[in-house]
Image (cartoon, grey):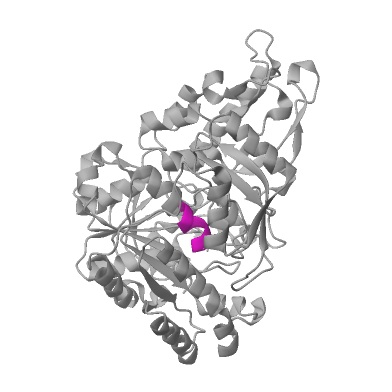
Amino acid sequence: MNDLEIARKVKLRHIEEIAETLGVERDQIEMYGKYKAKIPLSFIDREKGARSKLVLVSAISPTPAGEGKTTVSIGLTQGLNRLGKKATVVLREPSLGPVFGIKGGATGGGYSQVLPMEDINLHFTGDFSAIEKAHNLLSAVIDNNIQSKTSSLGLDPRTISWKRVIDMNDRALRRIIVGLGGTTSGVPRETGFDITAASEIMAILCLAEDLHDLKIRLGNIFVGYTYKREPVYARDLKAAGAMTALLKDAVKPNLVQTIEGNPAIIHGGPFANIAQGTNSVIATRMAMTFSEYTVTEAGFGFDLGAEKFFDIKCQSAGLSPKVVVLTATIRALKYHGGADLKELTIPDCEALARGLPNLEKHLENIRQFNMTPVIALNRFSTDNEREIRVIREKAAELNTAFAVADLWARGGEGAEELAEKVVEVAESDPPTFNPLYDWNWDVKKKIRTLATKIYGAEHVDYTPQAISDLKKISELGLESLPVCIAKTQKSLSDNPALLGRPKDFIVTVREIEIASGAGFLIPITGNIMRMPGLPASPASENINIDHEGHITGLI
């Protein structure tokens, strides 16, 4: 059976029952039908949450299809519950772009899924829509202010980088002209669309502590300059209040369940290349309030989402994880060892061995944060014992805990070995997490630290535009913000063609964007896509619905 067929066979527990397993009464949740609900922020208890053991699931550098961090996170949570630990998984919400594009949904797979998968993958509780509306409200207010003759702030359209967003892959919207049609239709200028997951408001929602903090952060969004070279923020346009009002429900985390009936909290969905790539601080705190173990994941490889989880999210929210699970797959290691994408299911121990330096580098990176790693080999049906033995021997050589996670086929039962390893590390008084850099360091020093220590670069170059951006950041007094480096997920470097563990390369910073609302700077390296396009045969071609409302083709 495929994922959807497996999900359909499950008899879901009413969401009221799931809430009760957390200790939340039925009349205290806000239900969206029988199987989805929002949890009020008033339940967050930081003192109780401090006793929860936070587990981060990350991965080696992925193949284009991803290596199953979400499946591992869900399976591990089910495995922990099977061991008698009270565990909750906390995940990001899927974006419709990948759902209808090339990757499909983001609710796990096989017998390690969160349910109801159709609802979660399609519209869920409307959070993405609310974020989209709040973002586009600011876009409309900006253009209205440029047009206005009575309340204009004198915005210089040439300095505005704020675009519009839509939760769909649509390459035709990347660059557009607005304001055509004469003087009553606005001032013509070039702009474009990003996908909703790349919106700064998504990043803000996922770092906000509460509704009040959310409004302050929205007001801090940098919009551009006036013709007099004065900075303009969203608060100057009096937009923050209305934007926050649109997000009053979206700020509350969503409660669903795993395929084995364990609680799952899903909230927010920022990209891991242009943003921090992890679920909301609010959702993480909520899960920690109710759970002995809280399992969460960070997007792409450890060099992207996990680094930002530690240096941005944990620093901002004061979180201290206990253990890192590094997801690896035999197909990804063979890919980084030079095997062709079309041949990754063919046994090839030589290519696998050549790809192991990528695994080794990610383990080194985990230890740079003073964290103890556990390798989770996400097993596929095409894996063979000889290949598994190669990785097991490498883990032993590196003195690293290792477990085969047969999660797709066996769910929590296939994760028990991994869960035991995680518990062993988490309950052995692990060392305290340390960030890699101090936010107060010089911006160039922060970038250089990540480029050399995490990516393995020899040097960092800056284009004239990036140097100009550094000057602007200094003028605005934003040098103490952390850096959220945007780079390819396909390589440890900024060049997607450099697989494995590249060395002696130079990272080039093209420009540095300001996300002052989210509270970080975004050095851009390489060509980062914030509005993906659909493939030649998008996944949407296979999705359908019958006259009884049964959806098919959703993966």
Q: Main secondary structure of the magenta part?
A: helix
Residue 68 lies, in percent from the top left, at: 47, 68
Residue 470 lies, in percent from the top left, at: 63, 38
Foreground residue among 72 and 539: 72
Q: How many marks?
A: 0
On screen, residue 493 above or below 439: below
Left or right of residue 154: residue 308:
left
- Can residue 104 be seen at all in this image of the molecule? no
Foreground residue among 288 and 122: 288
On screen, residue 285 above or below 298: above
Residue at the far bottom in the pictured view: 386
| Quadrant of the image occupied by residue 192 | top right
Residue 481 lies, in percent from the top left, at: 50, 39
Magenta highlight on residue 233: no
- Can residue 27 be seen at all in this image of the molecule? yes
Foreground residue among 231 and 191: 231
Residue 215 lies, in percent from the top left, at: 43, 28
On screen, residue 178 above or below 11: above
Task: Residue at 57% x, 79% y: name it.
Answer: 355
Foreground residue among 226 and 296: 226
Left or right of residue 547: residue 466:
right
Task: Residue at 58% x, 47% y: name it.
Answer: 444
Left or right of residue 305: residue 65:
right
Magenta stretch? 300-308
Residue at the far top in the pictured view: 150
On screen, residue 208 above or below 483: above
